[in-house]
Amino acid sequence: MLEQLSDIRERAMAALAAVDSLTALDAWRTEYLGKKSFVTAALKSIGQLPPEDRPVVGKAAHELRLALEAALEEARQRVLALEQERAAQAERVDVTLPGRPATLGRLHPITQILYEIYSIFAEMGFQVYDAPEVETDELNFQLLNLPPDHPARDMWSTFYTTRDGILLRTHTSPGQIRAMRQFCPEPIRVILPGRVYRYEAVTARSESMFHQVEGLAVGPRITMADLKGVLTDFARRLYGEHRQVRFRCSYFPFTEPSMEVDVSCALCDGAGCRVCKHTGWVEIAGAGMVHPQVLRNGGYDPEQFTGFAFGMGPDRIAMLRYGIDDIRYFYSDDLRFLAQF
Ligand code: PHE
């Protein structure tokens, strides 16, 4: 029995020296000091020994237990320090690493195009004039020669509000009336940018909300030559010096005569491609000379004043510029898309 006890001591101490984690330490404690350990069994069995052996074996077993307990405590300190060291290594922070760069915001591609348009027109003396997106039927339609039930209202599918006569503007043209009423009787050179709304199915080519930039010039001797000059100059500054510009007859109730403005396709240089639908031309604006009745509605005497107006779509311009084939990308708030501009 005494020999066994001293064997156990040796084995236990050797095993303890190899313990390097709290889990292993716990296992060691169970094996050498637990209920089923040899030492515990030895202490319990003393009663069955011959009386003369009891003091010697009892003392030896008791001493062994004290020694193992003391060794356990010592080992616990050592293992704790080890574990702390290990945790510190694992969670170590390298203070010399550079910080994570803060992601910078940027302007939406449509906003970038708008700013470009503003600066081109600013150089031609046009100032930006803001007009509301929620409009009256009167300004959006009636004062632009579109009385209720006029068939040309079919050109604009409209979002009406529950308030009678209040709607979301279908184009930026009502801003013409607002600008005229504010500036009359002075001459005017303004552009009116902003969102417009149409009650239409959302597709790759059309959203129910998009942008327009309206232009309006009113003065004593403004002619169609001014309109053509301004739009040609604009198109060449925006799309490139050698772009061709053409004017096609069209119809708008608030301009007379009216026209549609095309530029030669910047992608195929007029040769014909998918973007220009193989015509070589891309439509960029509707335009015309301000209708005398519209001038009158704005407060101007059409005998004294003439004017031109145009409306263009910066979303389309951005799509052409960046080769984007689906307008919905602009409004889907996807940073993976937006971060590319
Ligand atoms: N408001 C017209 C549209 O939305 C465009 C336009 C503006 C045409 C100004 C002529 C003059 O289609």
Image (cartoon, rainbow, N blue to C red):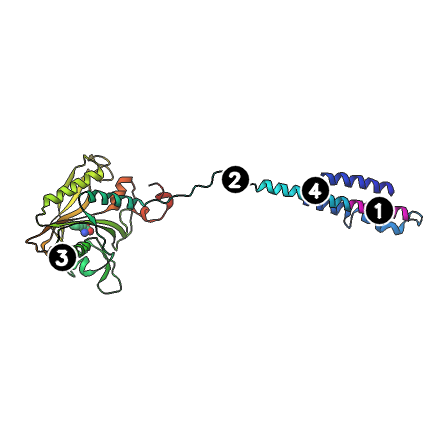
Q: Of the residues under marks 3 and 4, which one precedes in the sequence?
A: 4
Quadrant (top left, top right, bottom left, bottom right) of the C terminus:
top left
Question: In the image, is residue 219 above or below residue 267?
Answer: below
Q: Earlier in the sequence, mark 4 or mark 1?
A: 1
Q: Point out the residue furthest to the left here.
A: 303
| Residue that mark 2 sits on | 95
Which region is colored magenta? Answer: 54-68
* Residue type for callout 1: Ala
Horizontal arrangement in the rendering, residue 305 relative to residue 200 (left or right): left
Element on which disc 3 rests? helix
Which mark lies nearer to you, 2 or 3?
Answer: 2
Q: Are marks 2 and 4 in contact (CB under 8 Å)?
A: no
Q: Which kind of residue does numbered mark 4 sit on?
A: Arg
Q: Earlier in the sequence, mark 2 or mark 3?
A: 2
Q: Which residue is mark 1?
A: 61
Q: Which mark is residue 78?
A: 4
Give, as a three-letter code, the residue at label 3: Gly
Viewer-side label of 4, 1: 4
Residue 63 colored in magenta in the image: yes
Q: Earlier in the sequence, mark 2 or mark 4?
A: 4
**Neighbours of disc 3 within 10 Å: few (<14), some (14-19), many (20+):** many
* Residue that badge 3 annotates: 298
Query: Under 8 Å from ligand 1: the CB of mark 4?
Result: no
The Cα atoms of the two marked residues, 2 and 1, are separated by 54 Å
**Residue 74 position in % (x across, y down):** 73, 44
